Amino acid sequence: MAHPRLGVLVSYLRTEEKLILANARERGIEVTPLFDKDLVLNFTARSGAASKVDVDVVLDRCVAHARAGYAIRTFERWGIPTLNTSESVQICDDKALNSIALEEAGVPTPKTILAFSLESALEALEIVGYPAVMKPVSGSWGRLLAKVNGPEQAKAVIGQKLELGSVHHGVFYIQEFVPKPDRDIRAYVVGDKVLAASYRSSEHWVTNAARGATSMPCPITPEIEDLALRACAAVKARLAGVDLIETPNGLQIVEVNSGGEFRGLMSTTHVDIAAEIVSEALATAKRADEKPGASAAASTR
């Protein structure tokens, strides 16, 4: 049986996407990068062919969250299975929805509160206690995070966010500041497996690889494996980078990142992550093809 045609939704080609494309081509898979800036998504069309999306499965590697969400939902409407699904991407790209899903599933996470005004945000900060962390509900790479040590500093940060005027900046995502080592843990999940994990160490409290943190090998303990897989199940992700922190009360999940970068992780493991991702994309196409009614959906493509 021929391989399904693979589309890779991208904003631009990073190291990870180049490895994914190269692996697919080495395996004789027809693979096409789908650049978000070039998409023309015709909602009245009955298939992706009219919008030059003539593939059998799409792998989401897009870094523009809004573009990815709209594109993936459109692909699904056309009957094209995606990794991850639009539902999962929506949850993972919104820290508030992420936290709600984890909390509902009983996954241990830092105490988190939402507020929508200066007054309610200050009240929320008093509940979690100072110092506290304020984050945008949407964003990556540790950007726009703020650690506030008291009410006056909090008022300054909140005031600045309100001045920005964005809808997202009017939502205050407030999280307790958890004492932890100068590191966090990134566990990489593909399908039903935790492929690898790394410690991300930094002198800054934001231990994010994009902010200069260094990656070191981390053994995949039963606790890491259990929490990472439970977290992915909670947000319905089959491809994710899961961020964990070591706390005085054990490991906690900070968030689940749909897709997730793995360049730093590659230096800590011998696992071919790109190859595993391609295999999961092929498995996604196969599962979709085996669903009842799949042949009818395929006929519209």
Image (cartoon, rainbow, N blue to C red):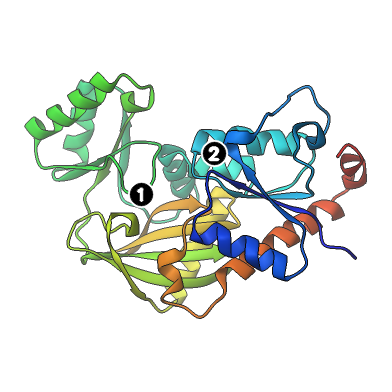
Using the rendered image of the protein, determine whether residue 228 is visible from the camera's viewpoint: yes
Count of marks, rendered view: 2
Question: In the rendered view, does 109 fall on the left or right side of 242?
Answer: left
The foreground one among 175 and 137 is 137
In the image, is residue 79 above or below residue 155?
below
* Relative to 2, 102 lies left or right: left
> Is residue 51 toward the left or the right of residue 298 in the image?
left
Q: Which residue is mark 2?
A: 90
Residue under the image location 17 percent in, 31 percent down: 157
Instruction: Tell me if 123 is positioned left or right of 223 in this view.
Output: left
Which residue is the site of mark 1?
141
Dividing the picture into quarters, in which one does residue 28 lie? bottom right
Instruction: Give the structural element (helix, strand or loop) at label 1.
Output: loop
Q: Amino acid at mark 1?
A: Trp
| Residue in the picture at 38% in, 71% down | 198
Name the quarter where the N terminus is drawn: bottom right
Amino acid on which disc 2 is placed: Gln
- Marks 1/2: CA–CA distance: 17 Å
Identify the residue at horizontal 62%, vertical 40% (top origin).
86
92 or 201, which lies in front?
Answer: 201
Q: Relative to 51, is 242 above or below?
A: below
Q: Earlier in the sequence, mark 1 or mark 2?
A: 2
